[in-house]
Amino acid sequence: MGVRAYNFNPGPAALPLEVLRQAQEELVEYQGLGMSLMEASHRAAKVQEINDEAQALLLELLGIKEGYHVLFMGGGASQQFAQIPMNFLTPEKTAAYAITGSFAEKAFEEASYYGKAAIVASSKEQGWSRIPGGNEYQLPADTAYVHICTNNTIEGSQYKDIPNVNAPLVADMSSDILGIQRDASKFDFIYAGAQKNLGPAGVTVVVAKDDFVAQGTKNIPVIFRYGTFLKNNSLYNTPPVQAIYMVNLVLKWVKANGGVAAMEAQNIKKADLLYNVVDASGGFYTTKIEKPYRSIMNVTWNMKDEETEKQFLKECKEQGFVGLAGHRSVGGMRASIYNAVPYEAVKAVADFMQDYQKRNG
Ligand SMILES: *Cc1c(COP(=O)(O)O)cnc(C)c1O
């Protein structure tokens, strides 16, 4: 095996080494099955065990006792942008969106293709630098649901408090599920593409209240109804078994390492390493995100001009740091420091940033 890089990719992102090693060990022949999971029937008992175990473990880690189910779906978080209004936005209602970054805005746009959608809070005018509080929301009387994106992966901002709203609350948690402690009972519907904090690409995780799913319209094709996935234990059609298996291993890893509370504590420590360097740099490094809303999953920062940033990123590459360039739509730098990114990796970047400033400041 070659040397594994310090991986700060935004998604697909770093996975725990222990998980990869176990997957390697079980790849060719899975626990007496006589074949790999990729070759097995999705109805095989061993496969169903993984499906059931992963669902139960995710609910446990989220602190959910009852009234919710986990669904494993395809199409990424982006498909959910469209599928949520398909199921829950009826012609007489309005879908309410808080837009706090470009993924949240995309979700709103998909809903507007489908029906009546309204922006009820926005930080676009402020360059996505903040998260509007729930008291700023202007909800229409016919609100079908309120949609938020709890962590803005591209911009580097994050909800620390979840707004209390008088309507079903739907959240895109793609980039911070299990990375920060949240009261899951506040949400009627949570979804996340797995490839940030939960596993590899190929499976999208939905955690939905049974009552809410039951309200979904029957007026759409069967394959798009959440009720179909709920009724069939995510086995209506062939699920991405290998990806679900990987998610299950990651969930076990999270549990073995102290659960969400421990993940959050470690993520705060990692994020502080970087924000402390930025704050102490006297403007050499800057961040656009106001302090209370700074993400502990994606840390973004800038330098005085693009040329300087390019030079910095070039040296980062030489150091073996991968994935530190900001999203192509915003530029600058971004360190994605999800659960699986070790403290040492983040410490190495923070040390390098200080050293770089000493040499160039
Ligand atoms: C990555 C990401 C998406 C898009 O996910 P896909 O699985 O690629 O569709 C949507 N929302 C958020 C918050 C993300 O981080």
Image (cartoon, rainbow, N blue to C red):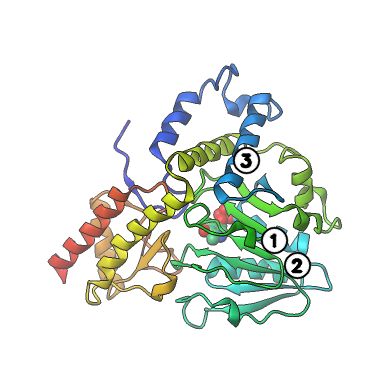
Q: CA distance from mark 1 to mark 2?
A: 8 Å
Identify which residue, 223 or 177, lies in the foreground: 177
Q: Which residue is mark 3?
A: 56
Q: Left or right: where does residue 242 sit relative to residue 160?
A: right
Quarter occupied by the C terminus: bottom left
User: Residue type at mark 3?
Assistant: Ala
Quarter occupied by the N terminus: top left
Write down which quadrant ligand 1 falls in.
bottom right
Identify which residue, 83 or 210, lies in the foreground: 210
Residue 336 visible in this rendered orientation of the protein:
no
Image point (65%, 70%), residue name? 109
Rendered image: mark on residue 18: none
Label 3 Cα crowd, 10 Å radius (few <14 / some 14-19 / many 20+) = some
User: Residue type at mark 2?
Assistant: Tyr
Q: Is residue 361 above or below residue 87?
A: below
Q: CA distance from mark 2 to mark 3?
A: 33 Å
Furthest residue in direction left, as rendered: 359
Rendered image: mark on residue 114: 2
Furthest residue in direction right, as rendered: 219
Label 1 Cα crowd, 10 Å radius (few <14 / some 14-19 / many 20+) = many
Image marks 1 and 2: residues in contact by CB distance under 8 Å? yes
Q: Where is residue 134 drawn, in percent x and y?
A: 59, 76
